[in-house]
Amino acid sequence: MSESFRAAEIRGGLDAAGLRFGLVVSRFNSFITERLLDGALEALSQGGASAEQTEIVRVPGAFEIPLTAKKMALARRCDAIIAIGCVLRGETAHFDYVAGEVARGVQLAQMDTGVPIIFCVLTCDTLEQAIDRAGLKGGNKGREAGLAALEMAQLSRRLREPAATAKAPRARKRR
């Protein structure tokens, strides 16, 4: 590729100015989800989000996250939504059904609405793994989700704006 070829690049930023955020939080496994929520709120706050720009909705469990996130997105009250939950593997197939359907539902909700929904539903084999991902050893996945929400909200906004410098190519005249 030629060094003179520079395609326009669009990126999201980490500035919350003028944006609104929703967080859907499962009460099930609240020992984990509250830590994830704290991490997400910390990241949003560091990006400049205030309490007035942020709405938290509590749901009973992870399975209820997709419907709630979709309703929030359809209401157009949020520029990005963070889905927070924790599903731990047990001795039955319940984990597989719940984890798979929550992931599928969140993806469908964001595709149907066009609102970014950040997936912060831990799907772990053990409580220890969940604790590690909620801030003990492996960082806080909630904080990562907060940063992703900031970036995707900005990116979505930029992609809705008409390209300032882009001109439609002219059709060539046939001879």
Image (cartoon, rainbow, N blue to C red):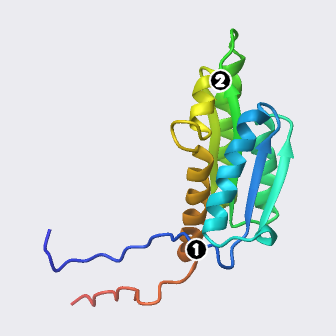
Does residue 111 appear anywhere in the picture?
no
Q: Which SS class for mark 1?
A: loop
SS assignment at label 2: helix
Seen as rendered, the residue at the extreme left is 2
Q: Quadrant of residue 133?
A: top right
Question: Residue 151: x percent and y percent?
Answer: 54, 65
The quarter of the displayed image where residue 19 is located: bottom right
Which residue sits at x=58%, y=45%? 140
- With respect to residue 46, does 18 lie above or below? below
The x and y percentages for residue 52 are 81, 71
Q: First in sequence: mark 2 or mark 1? A: 1
Q: Where is residue 167 shown, x and y percent of the image?
A: 40, 89
Residue 73: name its quadrant.
bottom right
| Mark 1 surroundings: few (<14), some (14-19) or many (≥20) residues within 10 A | some
Which residue extends farthest front?
136
The mark tally for this picture is 2
Local packing at callout 2 (Cα closer than 10 Å; few below 14, some 14-19, many 20+) is some
Q: Is residue 27 left or right of residue 133?
A: right
Residue nearest the observer in this picture, 104 or 172: 104
Amino acid found under the numbered disc labelled 2: Leu
Compute the Cα span from label 2 to label 1. Answer: 34 Å
Quadrant for the N terminus, please. Answer: bottom left
Residue 127's label in the rendered image is: 2
Q: Nearer the viewer, residue 62 or 142?
A: 142
Q: Residue at x 84, y 51 (%)?
A: 57
Residue 32 disc label: none
The residue tagged 1 is: 15
Q: What type is the residue that disc 1 sits on?
A: Asp
> Residue 59: percent from the left, percent from the top?
85, 42
